[in-house]
């Protein structure tokens, strides 16, 4: 069953996320009204079901001391709260459509009490591809009582985990991307999910499985598993269990690490997320594995990649003997930060994000075309680069 993970985060109206407000500490004096979770800064997670199913969570509105008479609290969804949250946290949440959320517009703290529970009900929905939604809940007024400046708002965010069918390729699926003209990139980020298993299903990384990606450009950008960098010709069986990127003349030491070190040896049969970044201003290239930096090098500042094409899985049987599964292949025209890579690696991103050069979710489930959903026209036809098989060996559904 498809699930949606819903996270609730506290924010201060004038502070950063997860920051408690100082004025809430003085509520006993001023009897301020505030959202309890926003004052303490915790987070919680609610798992929603498939589209159309409802789930309910609760937030607590409090007063610094017990109400003398029934006190009515007005609640609203305030888009400005979310705009401020996005600005401070470098996020792009959109306000959840009102038809999918139920929050009472008024609650009452009864005389003799200091708290009222506020139920929040969310109906799971599909939404726009790659968009994260949120509910910015705010105390608008409290029947003459003072509303806390710092703890009057609470952001309810939710997003879908990445669940999709992914294609399995072999050497005879060699393919290339549709590309017109030249794309100049002083900065770039290439990221992808990949899973490796041998044809027998009992191992992987049988050879260096070359040309996962081979860019046609003025500077080399060539990505493969393994080579003779580690192990030489001594017959060490694990010498291919690392990712190597050949680029800007630094391929000998730009990789995921020596597989003789068990902590760096890539596991066969498991999904791994990789991201490669380049920044022309500094010349730095950085490799991330599962959202964590594993290698940093320098190829020289001031360089600009002029790209005219990309091929995949294109080395032939001698150098490509394992099955390779891919998902969520993205090329950005920006140098993504570690935080951005980690945050979005298990999510779709906006299909029309202007910073994307191409985006291949590879979630079609069938057919010969892997679609570039950006609209930039960089589709791939399986097997069109000298391959003899124009469909994937399998499409298997995974949750990342």
Image: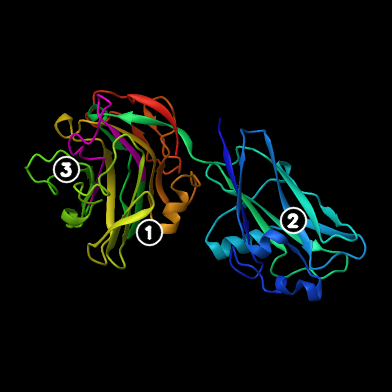
Residue that label 2 marks: 60
SS category of the residue bearing label 1: loop
- Circles 2 and 3, Cβ within 8 Å, touching? The answer is no
* Residue at x 15%, y 44% (from the top left corner): 227
* Residue at x 84%, y 54% (from the top left corner): 106
Q: Residue 293 in magenta? A: no
x, y percent for residue 278: 31, 59
Question: What crowding class fits label 3: few (fewer than 14 Cα within 10 Å), some (14-19), or many (20 or more)?
Answer: many
Nearer to us: label 2 or label 3: 2
Which of disc 3 and disc 2 is earlier in sequence? 2
Question: What crowding class fits label 2: few (fewer than 14 Cα within 10 Å), some (14-19), or many (20 or more)?
Answer: some
Q: Is residue 208 above or below residue 61?
A: above
Residue that label 1 marks: 335
x, y percent for residue 134: 63, 51
In the image, taking residue 244 as reference, residue 14 lies left or right, namely right
Question: Looking at the rendering, in which quadrant would you find the C terminus?
Answer: top left
For residue 279, what is the image quadrant?
A: bottom left
Residue furthest left as drawn: 233
Query: Which range is magenta?
Result: 192-217
Residue that label 3 marks: 239
Q: Is residue 152 above or below residue 94?
A: below
x, y percent for residue 293: 33, 57
């Amino acid at each position: 069953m498809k699930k949606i993970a819903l996270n609730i985060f506290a924010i201060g109206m004038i502070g950063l996320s997860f920051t408690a407000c100082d004025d809430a500490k003085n509520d006993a004096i001023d009897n301020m009204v505030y959202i309890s979770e926003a004052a303490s800064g915790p987070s919680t997670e609610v798992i929603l079901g498939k589209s159309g199913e409802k789930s309910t969570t609760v937030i607590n509105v409090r007063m610094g001391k017990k109400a003398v008479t029934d006190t009515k609290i007005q609640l609203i969804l305030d888009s400005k709260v979310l705009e401020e949250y996005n600005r401070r946290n470098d996020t792009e949440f959109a306000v959840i459509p009102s038809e999918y959320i139920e929050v009472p517009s008024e609650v009452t703290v009864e005389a003799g009490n200091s708290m009222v529970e506020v139920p929040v009900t969310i109906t799971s929905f599909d939404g726009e591809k790659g968009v994260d939604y949120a509910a910015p809940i705010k105390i608008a007024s409290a029947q003459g009582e003072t509303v806390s400046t710092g703890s009057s708002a609470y952001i309810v965010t939710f997003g879908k985990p990445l669940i999709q069918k992914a294609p399995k390729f072999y050497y005879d699926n060699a393919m290339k991307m549709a590309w017109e003209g030249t794309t100049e990139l002083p900065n770039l980020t290439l990221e992808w999910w990949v899973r490796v298993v041998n044809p027998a299903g009992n191992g992987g990384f049988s050879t260096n499985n070359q040309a996962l990606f081979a860019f046609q450009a003025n500077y080399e950008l060539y990505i493969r598993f393994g080579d003779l960098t580690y192990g030489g010709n001594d017959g060490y069986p694990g010498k291919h269990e690392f990712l190597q990127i050949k680029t800007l003349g630094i391929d000998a030491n730009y990789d995921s690490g020596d597989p003789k070190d068990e902590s760096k040896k890539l596991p066969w049969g498991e999904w791994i997320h990789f991201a490669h970044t380049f920044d022309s201003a500094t010349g730095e290239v950085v490799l991330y594995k599962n959202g964590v930096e594993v290698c940093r090098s320098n190829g020289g500042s001031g360089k600009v990649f002029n790209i005219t094409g990309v091929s995949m899985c294109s080395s032939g049987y001698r150098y490509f003997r394992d099955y390779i599964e891919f998902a969520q292949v993205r090329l950005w025209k920006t140098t993504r930060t570690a935080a951005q890579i980690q945050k979005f690696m298990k999510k779709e991103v906006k299909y029309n994000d202007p910073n994307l050069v191409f985006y291949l979710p590879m979630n079609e489930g069938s057919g010969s075309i892997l679609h570039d959903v950006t609209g930039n026209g960089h589709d791939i036809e399986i097997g069109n680069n000298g391959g003899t098989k124009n469909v994937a060996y399998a499409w298997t559904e995974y949750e990342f």
